[in-house]
Image (cartoon, helix red, strand yellow):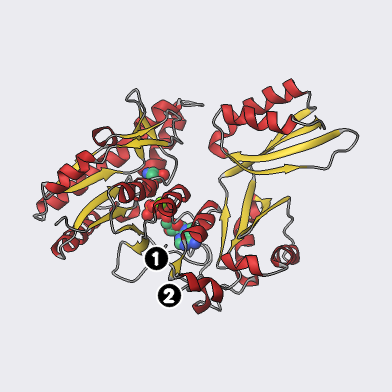
Amino acid sequence: MARKLVVMKFGGTSLATPERIKRAAARIARQRRKGWDALAVVSARGSATDDLLADAAKLAKHPAPREIDALLATGEQASAALLALALEAGGTRARSVTAHQIGILTDDNHRGAKIRAIDPRPLRRILSEGAVPVVTGFIAVDARGNITTMGRGASDKTAVVLAAVLKAKRCEIFTDVKGVYTADPNVVHDARRIPSLSHEEMLEFAAMGARVMHAGAVEWGKRFGVPIDVRSAFSSAQGTRIGAVSPMAGLDRSTVHGAATDEDWARITLHGLPDLPGRAATVFEVVAQDRINVDMILLNVPQGGLSDLSYTVLKTDLPKALANARRVAKRLGARSVSFDERIAKVSIVGLGMQDHYGVAARMLRALAKAGINVQAISTSEIKVSCIVREAEGARGLKVLHEAFQLRRRPKALAAGA
Ligand code: ADP
Ligand code: ASP
Ligand code: MG
């Protein structure tokens, strides 16, 4: 009978030193001694990705995304080889493998490539030989064999996707905090660990900036029902279980379970866009043609037949998105294009929001009381987000964490725990 499989993903800090790599190897070996098969997924060590990006920026003003991907891939490759060495040295058979060897195929949208296909056979072969595959997270290849990467933090995605295709029992994400907290514990010091969350809640939380989990990873976890455990790489403490939350949990759900801030987005505005049917559609068709991700969209009430259309794009996409916006503005006869990189999005998230009135009002009142000006608002059934000045992002987060009493009711956050 096939052994049960667990996918174990180690983040950058968890592999930063040889000591930590040894520790990760020992954890994998322990799991195998308990009768499990294990597959490891690794990120680049420490600040390797940021350091490589900083070097590239010193050499080129607008570095080619293809070369950036080739460069960044070296970070994950080093981690995979080092962890495989440490496993073998400790008596556990291991084989490091990179994306082209196991066919993680994406489109050619460098730095934000989307998965098209995965061939699980090479990994099954390594597992059946009794070895631990140590897979480079984050990186993949396109149909022409070029190295691609799937966006910052996307090692989580590699891990969850592999857990899904190999039908692992669960995916463990080892990181530098003890789980998912009510807000970033490195910013809000009295934030509390949330024992369990549904995929939906984590998806929204991650998309709003709780970067402890990559949103795209949670999306795959939701689609394929993969339970995800976020845990500390440095202790055996219980972490946060994502998914497999009891259906009754929703009945005893607090309104808001977490607050997050996200500084990855910039605003673009097309001013004086003629107010005619189909104009906004054209804008976003052209945006999509350039494969630019859009987050928030805001269309003002027209005045004198002209309206302003604002949307937010990833700061890393800004040069491309601005060129795109100027092109479309000219085509549609808009008056001008402006942008602002100095914005932050602060959000509150919670399934229980659906059953309460006045959540947005409470959020806006709290921000107003703190003197924080809100530039745009967007809502869904389970989240409210506001755009504020970048310099106010961290303070806004603390204000909301306090206003929704996230630190005082840790028990109520534990959906089904
Ligand atoms: P890794 O390299 O292990 O993938 P990341 O830096 O991507 O680590 O994610 C862990 C970090 O996420 C934490 O150090 C913490 O600062 C940040 N973080 C942001 N929001 C949250 C949250 N709600 N709960 C826990 N950590 C959070
Ligand atoms: N090394 C990549 C990054 O820093 C991927 C990851 O850590 O998940 O974004
Ligand atoms: Mg991460």
Q: Is residue 190 left or right of residue 94?
A: right
Distance between the Cα atoms at labels 2 and 1?
9 Å
Q: Secondary structure at mark 2?
A: loop
Compared to residue 297, the image places residue 370 above or below, namely: below
Residue 289 appears anywhere in the view? yes
Disc 2 marks a residue whose amino acid type is Ala
**Circle on res. 417:** 2
Q: Secondary structure at mark 1?
A: strand
Residue sitting at 56 percent across and 40 percent down?
A: 314
**Residue 219 x, y percent position in the rendering:** 46, 50
**Is tag 2's residue or tag 1's residue first in the polypeptide sequence?**
1
Q: Are marks 2 and 1 in contact (CB under 8 Å)?
A: yes
Compared to residue 141, the image places residue 352 above or below, namely: below
Q: The N terminus appears in which quarter of the rendering?
A: bottom left
Q: Is residue 162 left or right of residue 97?
A: right
Looking at the rendering, which quadrant does residue 135 occupy?
top left
Q: Is residue 284 left or right of residue 118?
A: right
**Residue 197 x, y percent position in the rendering:** 46, 65
Looking at the rendering, which quadrant does residue 79 occupy?
top left
Disc 1 marks a residue whose amino acid type is Arg
**Residue 166 x, y percent position in the rendering:** 27, 48
Q: Ligand 1 quadrant? A: bottom left
Is the shortest distance between ligand 1 and the CB of mark 2 under 8 Å?
A: no
Compared to residue 334, the image places residue 8 above or below, namely: below
- Write down the residue under mark 1: 241
**Residue 38 x, y percent position in the rendering:** 21, 54
Residue at the far right: name it. Answer: 304
Dot 1, how many residues are within 10 Å of its Cα: few (below 14), some (14-19), or many (20+)?
many
Looking at the rendering, which quadrant does residue 280 occupy?
top right
